[in-house]
Image (spheres, rainbow, N blue to C red):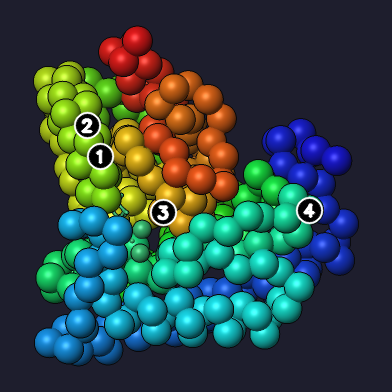
Amino acid sequence: MRNSSGGIEQRPVDRRAGYMVMENLKTMIKKAGQMILAADLEHADVEVKSSRGDLRTIYDTAVEEFLRQELGRLWPEAQFIGEESGLQKREAERYCFIVDPIDGTANFAWGYHHSAVSIALARGERIMAGLVYNPYLDELFHARAGEGAYLNGRPIRVSQRSLQDGMVSFGTSPYDKTKAAATFSLARLLYENALDVRRSGSAALDLCYVACGRCELFYEMSLYPWDYAAGSLIIAEAGGLLATMEGGELRFSDRTTLVAGGPPAFHDFWELYK
Ligand code: IPD
Ligand code: CA
Ligand code: CA
């Protein structure tokens, strides 16, 4: 049943259970963040996966394994999908954790200090909970469906600035360089129509920065569900709008294009991108 704000109406006992799960997830994601902070970058063993730009270190594997075990203990019936173990078919009605152990692996391995751990809880095509933790700034973004979005426990909202008065961040889809021409011609168009552009190296944090009004718009032409599942709920719960760049609804089973923003900048984007 939906309530007046569009969220799912929950019985008090469900709300309490949801709260407890979220508290456990917060503790867990912070422990994963500690693993990132404690990493020895001299011995991170950077490995190239599918293509140049698609990287893995021993810490990506270790953090994912830690979360797989902890999440399995917390909720044994739930499915687990993590970047390092790859996409799997999801069972429609089964709860599923979608995890990126380190979003921003290149930033991590280069000592750039802008990476995050991302955990989403999905059921079918609906994201029920999302957490994104940046251990370098000790910033934890979280949301539960229908209950708002928060940064370190304080409510956050998207920006109401127009595109013309706003910042645009974008991702370069580094796993797929065939997207480069389209990505950068759009970056130029948006640069000419906004204040400036940014490329941070972590899609999960880009989405959270839109959610808390540090940026007005974000787009990327190829992302995997673990990059955006948690961040997309955090933006939606902060009053933001999201779509594929073909104008469709976001799904969470395969790669996708994505654009997200505060409502004014999002509408301005479509005027330009028609
Ligand atoms: C990447 C980052 C990057 C984005 C890529 C992602 P990874 O994730 O989010 O900002 O441009 O598309 O794959 O590989 O560092 O987990
Ligand atoms: Ca990622
Ligand atoms: Ca990753």
Find out if the beta carbon at label 3 lies less than 8 Å from the nearest ligand 2 atom.
yes
Find out if the beta carbon at label 4 lies less than 8 Å from the nearest ligand 2 atom.
no
**Can you tell which of label 4 and label 1 is closer to the viewer?**
4
Q: Element under label 2?
A: helix
Q: Residue furthest front?
A: 50
Q: Element under label 3?
A: helix
Residue at horizontal 39 percent and vertical 84 percent from the top: 62
Circle 1: residue type: Phe
Residue 60: which numbered mark, if any? none
**Which residue is disc 3 drawn over?**
227
Residue 146 drawn at (x, y percent): 67, 46
Q: Looking at the image, can residue 134 be seen?
A: no
Q: Earlier in the sequence, mark 2 or mark 4?
A: 4
Tell me which corner region of the image, top left, top right, bottom left or bottom right, holds residue 270: top left
**Which residue is disc 2 drawn over?**
183
**Which residue is disc 1 drawn over?**
170
Residue at horizontal 14 percent and vertical 73 percent from the top: 111
Residue at horizontal 28 percent and vertical 13 percent from the top: 272
Q: CA distance from mark 3 to mark 1?
A: 13 Å
Residue 2 drawn at (x, y percent): 80, 38
Judge by depth and name the residue closer to the eye, 207 or 228. Answer: 228
Q: Earlier in the sequence, mark 3 or mark 1?
A: 1
